[in-house]
Image (cartoon, coloured by chain):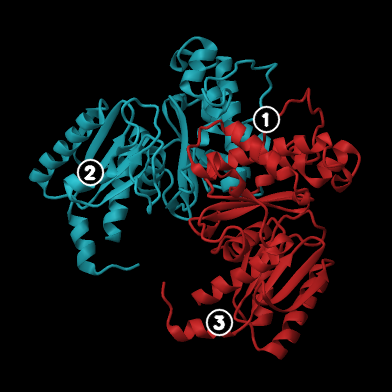
Chain colours: A red, B cyan
Amino acid sequence: MRMPEDVHAGSGKRLLGGIESGGTKFVCVIGRGPEEIVAEARIPTTSPEATLSQTVDFFRAEAAKYGSLAAIGVGSFGPVDLREDSATWGFITTTPKAGWEHTDVAGRLKREMGVPVAFDTDVNAAAVGEARWGAAQGLDTFVYLTVGTGIGGGGLVGGQPLHGLVHPEMGHMLLPRDQSLDPFPGVCPFHGGCLEGLASGPALLARWGRPAESLAEDHPAWALEARYLALALVNLVCTLSPQRIVLGGGVMEQAQLFPLIRKEVVALLNGYIQATAILDAIDAYIVPPALGNRSGRLGALAMAERLAASH
Amino acid sequence: MRMPEDVHAGSGKRLLGGIESGGTKFVCVIGRGPEEIVAEARIPTTSPEATLSQTVDFFRAEAAKYGSLAAIGVGSFGPVDLREDSATWGFITTTPKAGWEHTDVAGRLKREMGVPVAFDTDVNAAAVGEARWGAAQGLDTFVYLTVGTGIGGGGLVGGQPLHGLVHPEMGHMLLPRDQSLDPFPGVCPFHGGCLEGLASGPALLARWGRPAESLAEDHPAWALEARYLALALVNLVCTLSPQRIVLGGGVMEQAQLFPLIRKEVVALLNGYIQATAILDAIDAYIVPPALGNRSGRLGALAMAERLAASH
């Protein structure tokens, strides 16, 4: 929808806030985009009371310098409640993170800061960031998958972050495996050998007895890792038909994984999906995030920008 | 967007056309909904020339009686081109159905009938139908999966049919399997034991040597079938977070499958997705289509209705 010119200009002038809220720290930024960050803070994730009040203090202090923010976006660890008509919208819900169960995050920020607050999962935020300034510009349907301490996925479908009953939990997909080749039972306390149970950082550590980053580039760990990730990507292609897949997270800093994954995906699909993006341009189809490890915080900023534009 | 009142009234009065175009027949309907079908025809799928001209003849003859149609919707076998900016939008593309490769369906109907034409996959059409008049009313994000000669899935996400790079091909998901329990290699010419390769009607026939409908209700085929379908549904839940899953198609006419599938889905998710729809109300979460085998043709009509409302 076209907005009156003065509204556009107004929100263009005011700064935006973004919060990447993780289980270890809250990364808070103020700015207008990757090249225009005027303040940043890292606040340890301790108790909700301490962390959220330090977060509010940071934004208040900066707003006193730079003027009130147009909106704040939050990309949060979860699970979270994203249902707009829910009494607990904007809450972190049944998280295993001690003390954080059923914590109102978005509502509290909204009340204490007096600005509109956008709220989504950390991975949907990262997807919004990559769509705005990164590797998914111009796309309306794509997936962002992070492979690190956990495995999580989000994305846009028809230009909007993927919600639904709860939100995607792509790390818990169930995949084919040959237990004679890989007898490792997996580390997921719920599903054993789901994607996260087999291919997250902790899974690599448990299977090989060493942290992923200490395994040589030609260690057999990487071919197996690429295999599991490729199986998951094939299922994402068959389910969501993404225009691109962005793979981020600590484990994906092992750049040797990308060619291995691409080759496996093409082999597994076996020509069934007749799309040049897959058949002829797989290098541009399965890609790292262009915003590096800043996708989440910049995505939170982009969520704030979207919200401000709609107000 | 609100439309001027006279446009609404106009399209409300005029009839709509719907086409469920399958590999065996085109089912064509004219009407306004399930209780208001004024004409119906079944046209065998022979050559594109013969089938499409008979289709046009039917709609022209009926329009001569009832007045011009407001729009026509087509839910088609595929693969199809759904990219609105594509020169081959509305085409059936690389189908194995002989003679139908690269056939313009929607463009031809539009030109020859002179009315707006909506075009989507058969399963997205069925999803639109179930959303409008069936088992998914009031939902904006859900999946429709058909299990029959093939396995195909579609759905709405944020209220819109799921498109993307191409369109979903949910039947080709790759699933965990225990080959010591089920050594059957699968019937998919591309992937062997993908979902469709293991659990479609032809897979049941090939594995058990008898058509699915002739297997007794307590035959072990059904527990295995439920297992594979449940694994696929778990992956759909983890990827799309649907508010409901509608299971249609010939194989799902075996009503004993529903309780088996529901039980397996709950067991496989193992409490990870904290949603009452799954934990406490699975019987209302995994359901048969309310429109029976008419989801596709009525969905095509509902697509025409959506298109007419936006014109």
Tag count in the figure?
A: 3
Mark 1 is on which residue type? Pro
Residue sitting at x 42%, y 30%: B249
Q: CA distance from mark 1 to mark 2?
A: 43 Å
> Farthest residue in the front direction?
A280
Which residue sits at x=26%, y=60%?
Answer: B311
Q: Amino acid at mark 3?
A: Gly
Q: Earlier in the sequence, mark 3 or mark 1?
A: 3
Percent coordinates x, y for residue A191 in the rendering: 74, 38
Q: Is residue A14 left or right of residue B43?
A: right
Looking at the picture, which amino acid does disc 2 mark? Leu
Q: Quadrant of the N terminus of chain B?
A: bottom left
**In the foreground, B70 or B8:** B70
* Residue located farthest toward the top when viewing the structure as drawn: B209
User: What residue is drawn where x is 81% and y is 37%?
Assistant: A221
Mark 2 element type = helix
Residue B272 appears anywhere in the view: no
Q: Which chain does tag 3 point to?
A: A
Q: Which residue is label 3 attached to?
A: A12
Q: State which chain disc 1 sits on.
A: A
Q: Which residue is mark 2?
A: B109
Cα distance, mark 3 to mark 1? Answer: 49 Å
Instruction: Please rate how many residues cluster around mark 3, counting C-alpha atoms within 10 Å: few if below 14, some from 14 to 19, many from 20.
Output: some
- The chain ID associated with circle 2 is B
Task: Give the left or right position of residue B294, taking residue A18 as reference.
Answer: left
Residue identified by numbered label 1: A176
Q: Is residue A224 above or below residue B218?
A: below
The image shows residue B302, relative to residue B6, as above or below, that is: above
CB within 8 Å, label 1 to label 2: no
Give a yes or no on whether discs 3 and 1 share a subunit. Answer: yes
Q: Position of residue A238 (x, y in %)?
A: 54, 39
